[in-house]
Image (tube, rainbow, N blue to C red):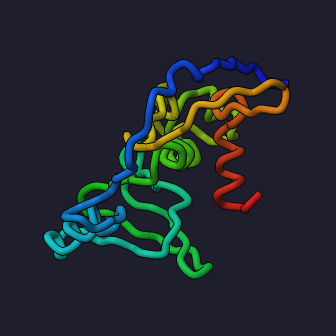
């Protein structure tokens, strides 16, 4: 049974607005076109992007990130960094990747059975997704029929979904 707080937002529904998110000069844009492509074109010599790849672990030398273990086309590979590693895997996946790599709170690392590299208690806390993420208000009559991401989803659940499809 989940802990659930149900609020009635009916009194707040005052109107509507057109949803014009992700628009640039009248055209819909995606993350790649808006953020990756301009950087990729400007920093070709300094930035190595690996498309169609899934990072499974950050590789450390003592407590300094030196590379990543990743998979592309079913083949495990390693990429080492000269300067820095940028993790941009979103609000949910970035903490999972860090915890799998040994960076996180002692409690989360112990639960994941991962040897600590760096203890950082705030990893995975205060998660914030994209500012334009819209979740419409709703009411429920049977609280047992609902599910709360904050109280029901663990890092291992997300990891299992992402990497094992379960």
Q: Residue at x 69, y 40 (%)?
A: 113
Task: List x then y, in percent, for residue 71.
Answer: 55, 72
In the image, residue 59 lies at what x, y percent?
A: 46, 56
Please name whichever residue, 45 or 37, is drawn nearer the observer in this view of the structure: 37
Residue at the extreme left of the image, as rendered:
42
Q: Quadrant of residue 35?
A: bottom left
In the image shown, does 42 or 3 lie closer to the viewer?
A: 3
Q: Where residue 137 sits in the image (x, y, percent)?
A: 58, 31
Residue in view at x 34 percent, y 67 percent? 32
Relative placement, left or right, of 113 versus 94 is right
Of the pair 69 and 143, the residue shown nearer to us: 143
41 on left or right of 148: left
Q: Is residue 137 visible?
A: yes
Residue shown at 39% from the left, 53% from the top: 88
Asked if residue 130 is positioned above or below residue 88 in the image, the reply reads above
Q: Position of residue 63 (x, y in %)?
A: 40, 42
The answer to which image quadrant residue 51 occupies is: bottom left
Q: Is residue 63 above or below residue 61?
A: above
Any part of residue 120 in sight: no
Res 129 → quadrant: top left
- In the displayed image of the protein, which residue is found farthest to the front? 15
140 versus 47 height, above or below: above
Count the numbered circles shown.
0
Left or right placement of residue 31 versus residue 38 in this view: right
**Nearest the camera: 88 or 32?**
32
Above or below, 46 relative to 161: below
Q: Quadrant of the N terminus?
A: top right
Q: Which image quarter is the C terminus in?
A: bottom right
């Amino acid at each position: 049974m989940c802990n659930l707080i149900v609020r009635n937002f009916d009194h707040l529904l005052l109107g509507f607005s057109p949803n014009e998110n992700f628009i640039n000069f009248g055209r819909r844009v995606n993350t790649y076109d808006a953020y990756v492509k301009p950087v990729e074109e400007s920093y070709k010599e300094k930035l190595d992007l690996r498309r169609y790849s899934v990072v499974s672990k950050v590789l450390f030398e003592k407590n300094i990130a030196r590379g990543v273990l990743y998979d592309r086309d079913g083949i495990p590979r390693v990429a080492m960094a000269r300067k820095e590693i940028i993790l941009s895997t979103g609000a949910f996946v970035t903490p999972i990747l860090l915890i799998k790599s040994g960076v996180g709170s002692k409690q989360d690392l112990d639960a994941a059975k991962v040897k600590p590299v760096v203890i950082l208690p705030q990893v995975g806390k205060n998660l914030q997704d994209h500012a334009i993420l819209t979740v419409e208000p709703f009411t429920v009559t049977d609280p047992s029929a609902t599910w709360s991401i904050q109280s029901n989803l663990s890092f291992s659940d997300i990891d299992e979904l992402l990497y094992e499809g379960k």
